[in-house]
Amino acid sequence: MAHPKADGNEPPKAPAPPSVNPAPLAPPVITVSGVVAEAPAPVAPPPPAPPKPAAPEVLPPVSFVPQPVTALPGELPGARVEGPAAVALRDAREPAPAGILVIDIGGTKVKMLAKGQTEPRKVPSGKQFTPAKLVEAIRLLPGDWEYDAISIGYPGQVGAHGPRSEPGNLGPGWVGFDFSAALDKPVKIINDAVMQALGSYDGGRMLFLGLGTGLGSALIAGQVIVPLELGRLRYDDDRMLGEVLGRRGLEAIGRRSWRRAVTATITTMMHAFLADYVVIGGGNAKMVKELPPGVRLGNNLTAFRGGYRLWGVEDVWVMASPGGETPEPTAQEALRVV
């Protein structure tokens, strides 16, 4: 369409520029084939998505915190653990057996006690004591005691399938012996010093020294049980530590020299392992008269308490009953043996 001409040859004036702040315009109209219609209203933005729920709080693993220990009527004092410590000691997927028989094998005698009983029963051991004789004693000695599982504290090295070395103070035949098949019960076997250490443990970093026929030793740090063989360390050029602090060393050098050697060893080991405290156990612990700071004597029954607690430590090997299969031990957040 042509623009109308103005007077003269002047070009048409350009329309005035819009104001700086124009007034709001009405909604635009659209003409389609002569039909006037309002433009569709702008679509409102979608509402914001609801916030995602917060991730569930992940609780840290329960650490072994010392708790007051109580006993039910007829139960060994200290054998029942309550509070958070029970969570750390008990397999959450499978409760511990109701009845447990604990066997503590020593170089001169074997002691056994069932959970709920108070007086251990004993049988002599010695150089002629074999696994077959132990089985015979377990069948006869408990008498009317009822139990569903067995814990054995063995005076030697223990592996995934039971004893892995023959004891020096007992008869032969321990390595490879199937106690579960012989006794028709599930069985857990652990070093005797480790079992006493487990029964003595009150949290933190604890070093256990067992003064018996030889020198037993174990370290529990946080949630890990570490069996040790400190008796194989050199005491001097001619003797090892176990030869001096064991029963033969006590007889050879006399009580006074033996006590001095024990005190020096305790102090050195406490510093070497950065232990919070040291527990002295074993049959000759009563011979120690003066204890350095941070050292205490264990109770004679702590080995049995450790045997009860053993069934809450998941990755200690369980020798399956006849006809059953034993799974490989697996780690858990509770106490474990390495």
Image (cartoon, helix red, strand yellow):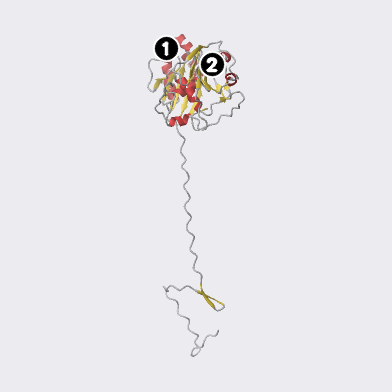
Question: Quarter holding the N terminus?
Answer: bottom right
Toward the viewer: 168 or 275?
Answer: 168
User: Vertically, is 328 above or below 131?
Assistant: below
Callout in the foreground (1, 2): 2
Mark 1 to mark 2: distance in Å? 39 Å
Q: Position of residue 196 (x, y in %)?
A: 47, 21
Amino acid carrying mark 1 in the image: Ser
Q: Which residue is mark 2?
A: 138
Q: Position of residue 284 (x, y in %)?
A: 44, 14
User: Vertically, is 25 above or below 305?
Assistant: below
Toward the viewer: 84 or 238?
Answer: 84
Residue visible at 47% across and 23% down? 306
SS label for mark 1: helix
Q: Position of residue 52 (x, y in %)?
A: 48, 50
From where the camera sits, is residue 108 visible? Answer: no
Residue visible at 47% across and 29% down? 89
Toward the viewer: 59 or 237?
Answer: 59
Q: Residues within 10 Å of mark 2 (few under 14, many from 20)?
A: some
Q: Quadrant of residue 62?
A: top left
Which label belongs to residue 257? Answer: 1
Q: Quadrant of residue 176?
A: top right
Amino acid carrying mark 2 in the image: Ile
Farthest residue to the front: give it: 144
